[in-house]
Amino acid sequence: MAAIPLILISAGLLLAFKMKFWNIGAYGQYILGAMFSSFFALHISPHTPSFILITVMCLAGLVGGALWAIIAALLKLFWEVNEVISTLLLNYIALYILDYFMHGPWRDPSSHGFPLSKSFAANARLPILMHHTRIHLGLVFGIIATIVIYILIKKTKFGYENKVIGENPTAAKYAGINIFRNTLIAAGISGGLAGLAGMAQVSGIIHMIQMELNADYGYTAIIVSWLAALNPIASFFVAIILGGLEAGGYQIQMTMSVPFGIVGVIESSILFALLGGELFKTHKLVFGREKSHHPIQ
């Protein structure tokens, strides 16, 4: 179900975006979360109780994604490195790390050279919530994440401080708000949820670690966050809509030979329309020749 990773990632992104920490690295955080959780799926005994292993994998996914995001946060806090650049470049590093493991230590010898791991044992797979569907326990994770992020933003001191930091960092500093701590926490939560989305994908859908992890969800979730106007509840429903669009894209590619890229065109068009609408809220378009203020000689 494509909506599940979008729900998780967008919930984390909008928390970071609220404080103007532009996390463009959900792609890489998703990959690291998938890798951290897959390590335990591949190396822990298949006789381990499923509840324990799934819990460990969830925590590993959260930690993997959070650590990758915190790297960018530390670069920003200590050396003022722009987080758009650092998070974007960290995406490529994450991809190369995955490439190394999938062509080396984690590749299944019986895969005939394909970059695939062994299939996860049954105890490392997320339970399916509805029979004859692909809806798994990750949906519950997404619902919980949405509620938690909503409470953090709307009902807590942390959420208020993040809003102040985003609107005026100088005022936040003079008000005694701990910008260093809040930035690390926001980045950690944002990256952690992206990592959890990676865990949910490999454990609930793919049942192995491989090069093709649908990590592009990390970029699509940015569109989800902005279409939802950084509202956690709205992002949940927008993620379901765009998730359906993603799933439908694969269907029309198979049945009608329409390239899957049309999905990206539609998503981009929706985003541009939204941004254009916001522009006209604050600017007025005037047609006509500009009048000269110089007197006639």
Image (tube, rainbow, N blue to C red):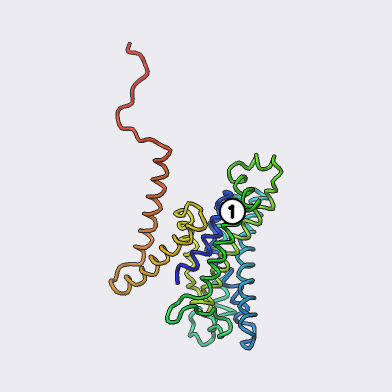
Q: Amino acid at mark 1?
A: Ile
Residue 40: x %, y % from top left: 63, 78
Q: Is residue 98 left or right of residue 279?
A: right
- Asked if one can make out residue 88 in the rendered structure from this viewpoint, the answer is no
Quadrant holding the N terminus: bottom left
Label 1 CA crowd tier, 10 Å (few <14, some 14–19, many 20+): many
- Of all residues shown, which one is farthest toward the front? 155
User: Does any portion of residue 77 appear in the rendered image?
Assistant: yes
User: Residue 9 at x, y = what percent?
Assistant: 53, 63
* Relative to 297, 104 lies left or right: right
On screen, 143 above or below 56? Answer: above
Above or below 263: residue 102: below
> In the rendered view of the protein, which quadrant contains the C terminus?
top left
**Residue 148 in picture, x, y percent from top left:** 59, 61
Q: Which residue is mark 1?
A: 153
Determine the residue positioned at 49% across, 72% down: 213
In this picture, residue 165 sits left or right of residue 262: right
> SS at mark 1?
helix
Q: Residue at x 42, y 44 (%)?
A: 278
Task: Give the residue furthest to the left.
Answer: 256
Asked whether 218 or 54 is in front, the reply is 54
Q: Quadrant of residue 47?
A: bottom right
Residue 61 at x, y = what percent? 60, 70
Horizontally, residue 46 falls left or right of residue 248, namely right
Along the line of sight, which residue is nearer the eye, 237 or 92? 237
Q: Quadrant of residue 288?
A: top left
225 versus 259 height, above or below: above
Marks counted in the figure total: 1
Name the one closer to the observer, 10 or 294: 10
Identify the residue shown where x is 45% and y is 62%.
Answer: 239
Residue at the far top in the pictured view: 297
